[in-house]
Image (spheres, coloured by chain):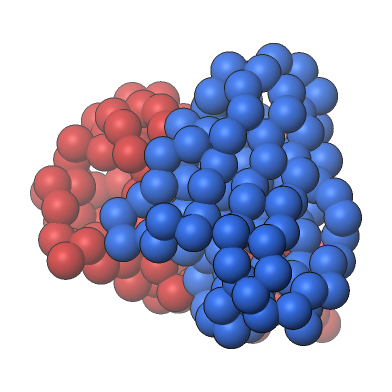
Chain colours: A red, B blue
Amino acid sequence: EVKLVESGGGLAQPGGSLRLSCAASGFTFSSYAMTWVRQAPGKGLEWVSAITDSGSTTYYADSVRGRFTISRDNSENVLYLYMNSLRVDDTAIYYCAKRSGHSYGHNDYWGQGALVTVSS
Amino acid sequence: ETVMTQSPATLSVSPGERVTLSCRASQNIGTNLAWYQQKPGQAPRLLIYGASTRATGIPARFSGSGSGTEFPLTISSLQSEDFAVYYCQQYSYWPLTFGGGTKLEI
């Protein structure tokens, strides 16, 4: 059974930093691309970042480029999202999701999400 | 950026009805289109990928179609558990983009 469990969410001040983790199990983690998607309170889904299976290529939404960094540890089956220079409008539930291919495809499995609140 | 437009934003329907949700892409995305269902307090769940392929465990009453820029999702006979928000997403171009969602309410 595929399982994705996010952790690391919480309260941060504007300009602060947080690191989200996503522990993966039930599939060969190193063979699949992964992605982060967020959802602000009462709003729709917004894609944030993606990374290929090897970690060699990363992609970012314009809204987070230069502030967020996606990475993965294929030896530990963990996906990360380092969030710096946080803004109030980064407040959201952050979901990690497995993509269906090595570098491409739809999101076939999702975690339950981690809440990030940015407030002074 | 590929803009995904879903309509309507909210649809009031009754159990047993047949309903079609619309998703339109601002440029040709082939069949690189997925549909997700999200219930309150839950993560999204994959329904359809490749515009028309049902994900594992998804009932046959859900059907997707289309290619290029127009992608309808049809639910043939609404069940109580189908009342949720539905999102389409294109994965043909970066950045990946979602539609704004359609909420099915009773």
The N terminus of chain B sits in image quarter: top right
Residue B7 in the image, given as x and y percentages of width and height = 85, 50
Residue at image location 54% in from the left, 24% down from the top: B31
Residue at image location 14% in from the left, 61% down from the top: A26
Question: Position of A97 compared to B38: left or right?
Answer: left
The C terminus of chain B sits in image quarter: bottom right
Identify which residue, A2 or B101, lies in the foreground: B101
State whether residue B93 appears in this view: no
Query: Image height check: is B42 above or below B101?
Result: below
Identify which residue, A41 or B48, lies in the foreground: B48
Q: Quadrant of residue B2?
A: top right
Question: Position of B3 compared to A92: left or right?
Answer: right
Identify which residue, A113 or B77, lies in the foreground: B77
Residue B65 in the image, given as x and y percentages of width and height = 58, 34
State whether residue B75 appears in this view: yes
Q: Quadrant of residue A37?
A: bottom right
Identify which residue, A49 or A99, lies in the foreground: A99
Residue at image location 36% in from the left, 50% down from the top: B55
Question: Position of A25 compared to A41: left or right?
Answer: left
Residue A6 in the image, given as x and y percentages of width and height = 40, 71
Residue A80 in the image, given as x and y percentages of width and height = 39, 55
Question: Position of A28 compared to A37: left or right?
Answer: left
Residue at image location 41% in from the left, 39% down from the top: B53
Query: Image height check: is A83 above or below A8?
Result: above
Total tally of numbered discs in the picture: 0
